């Protein structure tokens, strides 16, 4: 390998020198490759922009070059009208699923995928100094908001949006869960990220709230399918919610089969971004697959079997014990507790793996100096999961024979741990750049089903 030009970046004895940083008694820094340097080539690129969002809620592209001044001006304009927060909207954090067969007959024939998006003013879409230099009231207006809508769109097989089938929905208000504010409270959202999962031929909507909440999603396009056929999709003992679209018209109709159920785990209030997956019933193949929630990825992989549409009512006191944080008020009166008290049924105990081995992508400094010197946080959470790989898939059609059981594969992400010396002026910028602040990395992982 040393005969190849540029080998120094991968050579344990040369990589520090290559980056202009020499090993010290404590540690040396190793620069991870950027995604656009190391990732596979993207074959089909798609920009997901919801045309349903009115232009008055868009940031004009002409203001991107001086977004800081735009934020300041927008804040002043809204303040004159006695309005809090910001009123522009951005979409990000997409979730994508293949539309199941039983749903397709209620949609245009071109509909292949369903995408979800988070719609909110809160963002980190511009250079960091555009935010850090903002006056505090303006900064708070950008980040502290009660607005966090759900965006949904139908895509064709080429990941292009079907015209007329992208919508924005204000979910929390319509299901009676919107966080109730009192004078003096800082603005805060009820929901955050939205994710989609297809399990046993049904679409499930997963949302980060105090912890993870879920319900089943029912889609129908106006003029497609029979309305009477939709009735058997609801749970008889629970209330269904036919949602009104905030933007996008009424061509795409969305119904929640029941109120959200809450997945409480040992994570308590910190649970978020759980991956939901299923494992086929090998003894009774015709029965529905068992459903699981992946509640931890690293350092200990943890999985809990769940029954998403069944719940038990728990007391408000039990909810309070899970969400209360030391130093916060000892009273609680939130609409969200309607869902929090609907504790999702779980089956058995959490399955917990041994501590995962050091990641195969870890650099030399992580092998030599584990623990506090490792650049990335030990704990990772969900990016995307889960894809089943059979033995044939793993062994590449028989060319390899080193694995004899199927695996489930996912993609997780973690970020650089905050280092106190980031803000110190005497630390050379070139050293800071080697482990940049808030840098994220995604990695593949696998586990036995």
Image (spheres, rainbow, N blue to C red):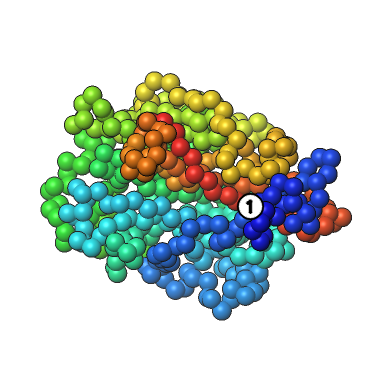
Q: Is residue 348 above or below residue 335?
A: above
Pointer 1 residue: 1
Is 283 situated left or right of 68 in this image?
left
Residue 181 is at least partly visible in this image: no
The crowding category of the residue bearing disc 1, from other C-alpha atoms within 10 Å (few below 14, some 14 to 19, many at least 20), is few
Considering every residue shown, the one lying at the far bottom of the view is: 62
Residue 226 x/y as whole percent: 12, 53
Q: Tell which of 2 and 279 is nearer to you.
A: 2
x 41%, y 48%: residue: 195
x 50%, y 31%: residue: 301
Q: Tell which of 349 and 251 is nearer to you.
A: 349
Q: Secondary structure at mark 1?
A: loop
Q: Quadrant of the C terminus?
A: top left
x 53%, y 25%: residue: 354
Q: Quadrant of residue 139?
A: bottom right
Considering every residue shown, the one lying at the far top of the view is: 348
Is 250 situated left or right of 388 in this image?
left
Residue 90 is at least partly visible in this image: yes
Q: Quadrant of residue 309?
A: top left
Residue 13 x/y as whole percent: 74, 47
Q: Is residue 76 above or below residue 39?
A: below
């Amino acid at each position: 390998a040393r005969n190849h030009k540029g080998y120094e970046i991968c050579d344990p004895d040369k990589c520090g020198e290559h980056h202009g940083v020499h090993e010290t008694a404590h540690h040396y820094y190793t620069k991870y490759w950027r995604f656009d340097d190391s990732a596979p080539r993207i074959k089909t690129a798609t920009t997901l922009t919801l045309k349903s969002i009115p232009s008055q809620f868009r940031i004009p592209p002409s203001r991107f070059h001086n977004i800081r001044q735009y934020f300041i001006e927008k804040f002043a304009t809204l303040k004159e009208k006695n309005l809090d927060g910001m009123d522009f909207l951005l979409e990000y954090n997409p979730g994508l699923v293949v539309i199941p067969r039983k749903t397709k007959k209620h949609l245009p024939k071109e509909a292949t995928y369903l995408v979800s998006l988070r719609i909110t003013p809160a963002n980190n879409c511009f250079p960091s100094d555009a935010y850090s230099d903002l006056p505090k009231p303006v900064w708070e207006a950008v980040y502290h908001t009660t607005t966090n809508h759900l965006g949904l769109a139908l895509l064709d097989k080429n990941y292009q949006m079907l015209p007329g089938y992208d919508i924005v929905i204000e979910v929390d208000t319509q299901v009676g869960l919107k966080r109730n504010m009192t004078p003096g409270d800082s603005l805060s959202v009820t929901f955050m990220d939205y994710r989609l999962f297809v399990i046993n031929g049904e679409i499930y909507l997963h949302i980060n709230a105090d912890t993870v909440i879920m319900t089943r999603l029912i889609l129908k396009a106006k003029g497609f399918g029979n309305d009477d056929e939709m009735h058997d999709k609801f749970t008889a003992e629970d209330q269904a919610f036919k949602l009104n679209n905030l933007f996008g018209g009424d061509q795409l109709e969305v119904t929640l089969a029941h109120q959200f159920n809450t997945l409480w785990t040992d994570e308590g209030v910190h649970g978020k971004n759980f991956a939901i997956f299923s494992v086929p019933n090998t003894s009774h193949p015709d029965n529905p697959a068992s459903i699981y929630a992946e509640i931890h990825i690293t350092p200990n992989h943890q999985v809990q079997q769940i029954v998403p549409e069944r719940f038990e009512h728990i007391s408000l006191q039990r909810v309070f014990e899970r969400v209360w944080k030391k130093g916060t008020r000892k009273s609680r009166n939130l609409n969200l507790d309607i869902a929090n008290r609907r504790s999702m049924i779980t089956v058995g105990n959490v399955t917990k793996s041994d501590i995962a081995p050091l990641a195969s992508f870890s650099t030399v400094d992580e092998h030599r100096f584990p623990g506090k010197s490792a650049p990335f946080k030990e704990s990772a959470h969900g990016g995307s999961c889960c894809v089943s790989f059979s033995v044939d898939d793993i062994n590449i059609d028989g060319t390899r024979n080193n694995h004899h059981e199927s695996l489930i594969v996912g993609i997780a992400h973690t970020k650089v741990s905050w280092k106190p010396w980031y803000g110190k002026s005497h630390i050379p910028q070139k050293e800071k750049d080697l482990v940049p602040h808030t840098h994220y990395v995604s990695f593949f992982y696998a586990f036995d089903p």
